[in-house]
Image: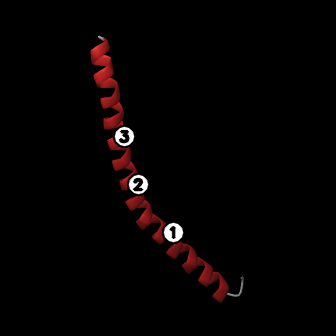
Amino acid sequence: MLVITLISFPLCFVIVGFFGIVATWVWMVVDLFSVSRWTREHNTALLAKIQSGQG
C-alpha cells in the first residue's frame, strides 16, 4: 500500500500540474482576444462621448 501511495501521489501532482498549465495557457489566449475587444469598445464609447461634448 505504501508503494502505491508513493508512486501515485507524485504522479497525481504531475497530471494536475499539466492540466493546470494547459488551462492557464488557454485562459491567456482567450484573454488576449477579450481584452483587446474590451479596450476597443471602451475607446469607441469614450470617443463618442468626447465628440458629443459630454466629456
The C terminus: image quadrant:
bottom right
Q: Residue at x 36, y 33 (%)?
A: 13
Mark 3 = which residue?
Answer: 17
Classed neighbour count for the residue bearing mark 3: other residues with Cα under 10 Å, few (<14), some (14–19), many (≥20): few
Mark 2 = which residue?
Answer: 27
N-term-proximal mark, 3 vs 2: 3
Residue type highlighted by circle 1: Trp
Residue at disc 3, secondary structure: helix
| Alpha carbons under labels 3 and 2: distance apart | 15 Å
N-term-proximal mark, 1 vs 2: 2
Mark 1 = which residue?
Answer: 38
Classed neighbour count for the residue bearing mark 1: other residues with Cα under 10 Å, few (<14), some (14–19), many (≥20): few
| Alpha carbons under labels 1 and 3: distance apart | 30 Å
Residue at disc 2, secondary structure: helix
Classed neighbour count for the residue bearing mark 2: other residues with Cα under 10 Å, few (<14), some (14–19), many (≥20): few
29 and 2: which one is in front?
2
Q: Give the quadrant of residue 32.
A: bottom left
Q: Mark 1 against mark 2, which lies toward the viewer?
A: 2
Place of residue 46 in the rendered image (x, y in percent of width and height, measured from the top left): 62, 79
Q: As drawn, is 39 to the left or to the right of 54?
A: left
Residue type highlighted by circle 2: Trp
Q: As drawn, is 37 to the left or to the right of 10?
A: right
Asked if residue 20 is positioned above or below residue 32 in the image, the reply reads above
| Alpha carbons under labels 1 and 2: distance apart | 16 Å
